[in-house]
Each structure stands twice: as structure tokens, then as C-alpha cells.
Amino acid sequence: MAEFLQILASGLTVGAIYALIGIGFSMIYNTSDIINFAQGEFVMIGGMSAVALSAGGAMPLVLAVPAAIAVTVVTGLAVERLAIEPVRHSSLVTLIIITIGVSITIRGAVEILLGKNFYRLASFSGDAPVDIGGAQVNPQAFWVVGSLLAVMAALAFFFNRTRLGKAMLATAQNRLAAELMGIDVKNILRLSFALSALLGALAGVLTAPITLTRYDVGIMLGLKGFCAAILGGLGTATGALAGGIILGLTEAMAAGYVSSAYKDAVAFLLILAVLVLKPSGLFGRRAVHRV
């Protein structure tokens, strides 16, 4: 039982990270139909910025973390303004290729500035493990899961209780109709990039104390977050949440009971199975168009 609880805690922690990244993918996809493959770099920037700002005690962790998130949000806005806005009427394939190019550019810039070393951010609540039924759980795991729950509650309030959130929902439903009703679709797209970058940065600063961070950590984390969004149903926050948790638990169980060498393979095989059997995702709905 202790071993099972240990694996369960690990799967929930990793799954929560995937869910945060997946929600970022879904948010941009909803408002623009763009798959932003630079989302993983937002995760990397968040973690690396927090490490750089807090290095040598230059800034206390309580200030370094929000400052790193702010840096990432500014980066997200810059990506939208400089890379997406000028070519927003291009084909979907062109826009996806542009986000891949942005991802490579950001990764290369961080490699030049901060090098290829691995860095660790200080844990938010120390490193002494918490005993739960014989399982030794890292205190940072509680921050990860708690932050995911807080994000889901905040997004529910934002989309259901604020005019701006409802404007984003309207844009996601029908951009042309939203624009005709007076909604500034350009600003909504910028907001979606800002929120997506914020979620990516949050995932980055939460995971850096556990798994370390480096200039290229965004590659695999971005792919896993994208898989979480696809698994749950691209375009829905609750789907990304469920997809991330399922993906994290599947990886943890495969690593714990089969072999850690097959962890990534099992995750991608799961995605392939879902795409074949239910292309809209486990919790997505097939789009219906009246003609």
C-alpha cells in the first residue's frame, strides 16, 4: 500500500503539471485555433527566470516567483504581438510553424544567456518529506496540486462572473459574431496569450524545485501538456485537467510497476489510442455544423 501511495502521489503531482500546461494550450486554441508549440518554453522561462532572480539571494523567493511569472507573461505578449499579430490571417499550418520557430528561438536565447547547466529552485516549504500512509511525499507536491485547484477555481470565476471572461467565451464560440457584437477580438487574443504564459510560468516555478530546470526542459513538458489537452479534449479546461491527471497517473504506474524506461512510450501510446478511438478526446464533443 505504501508503494502504491508513493506512485499515486507522484502521478498526481506530475499530472497536475501536465494539466496546467494543457490548459494553456486549450486557452489559446479556443480564441485563435492556434496550437502554440511555444507553450513549453513559457514553462522553461518561468523556472529559469525564478532561478536567475533568486540566485545568490539576490531576491527572496517570495518575490522571485511572481517576478518570474511577470517576465513570462511579458514574453507571451511579445510573442503574440511580434510573431502572431503580423501574420494572423495566414493559414493554420503557417501559424503553427511560426510557434515552433518561436520556441526554438527562445530556447536558443536562454541557452546563450544561462548556459546548459541544470538548475534547482529552492522548495517553497522545505525538503522534509511528509509521511502519508508510509509514502514519503515531497512538500512541493502539495503546492503543485493546490495551485492547480486554485487555478481551476479562479478560471471558473473569471469565465462565469466577469465580462472579460464572458467575452473570451464568446470569442471561442464564434469570433466573427463576437467581433460584430463589439468585442475587441485582438485584445482577447492577447489576453489568451498572457493567461497561457502565466499558467506555463506557474507550472515552471512549481516543478523546478522537484525536477530541476534547464534551457530545454520545455520540449518534453510542452509535448506532455499538449498530450494532456488532446487526451481530455482540446479546447476545454476541465478536459485538460482530466487528461493531465490521467496521463500523470498512467506514467507513474508504468514507471513503478513496469519500467521507467517505458514511461514516455506508454504516455504517447495512450494518446495514439485515444486519437484512433475517440479523436475528439475523452471529454471533448464532436463539433456539429448546420448546413
Image: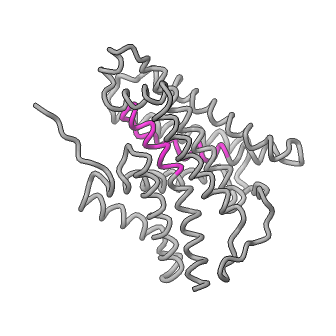
Majority secondary structure of the magenta segment? helix
Q: Residue at x 57, y 46 (%)?
A: 151
Colour pattern of the rendering: one colour
Report x, y in % for residue 253: 49, 76
Q: Residue at x 73, y 72 (%)?
A: 130
Q: Residue furthest left?
A: 291
How many numbered callouts?
A: 0
Identify the image quadrant of the C terminus: top left
Report x, y in % for residue 106: 60, 39
Where 207 sits versus 96, above or below? below
From the viewer's perspective, is 67 left or right of 202? right
Report x, y in % for residue 73: 62, 33
Where 186 sits versus 196, above or below? above
First to last magenta residue range: 20-46
Residue 42 magenta-highlighted: yes
Q: Residue at x 57, y 86 (%)?
A: 1
From the viewer's perspective, is 67 left or right of 231? right
Q: Quadrant of residue 109?
A: top right
- Closer-to-camera residue (8/273): 8
Report x, y in % for residue 61: 81, 47
From the viewer's perspective, is 115 left or right of 289? right
Q: Quadrant of residue 33?
A: top left
Q: Quadrant of residue 276?
A: bottom left
Residue 25 magenta-highlighted: yes
- Closer-to-camera residue (248/162): 162
Q: Residue at x 81, y 62 (%)?
A: 126
Where 33 sits versus 43, above or below? above
Where 258 sits versus 105, above or below? below
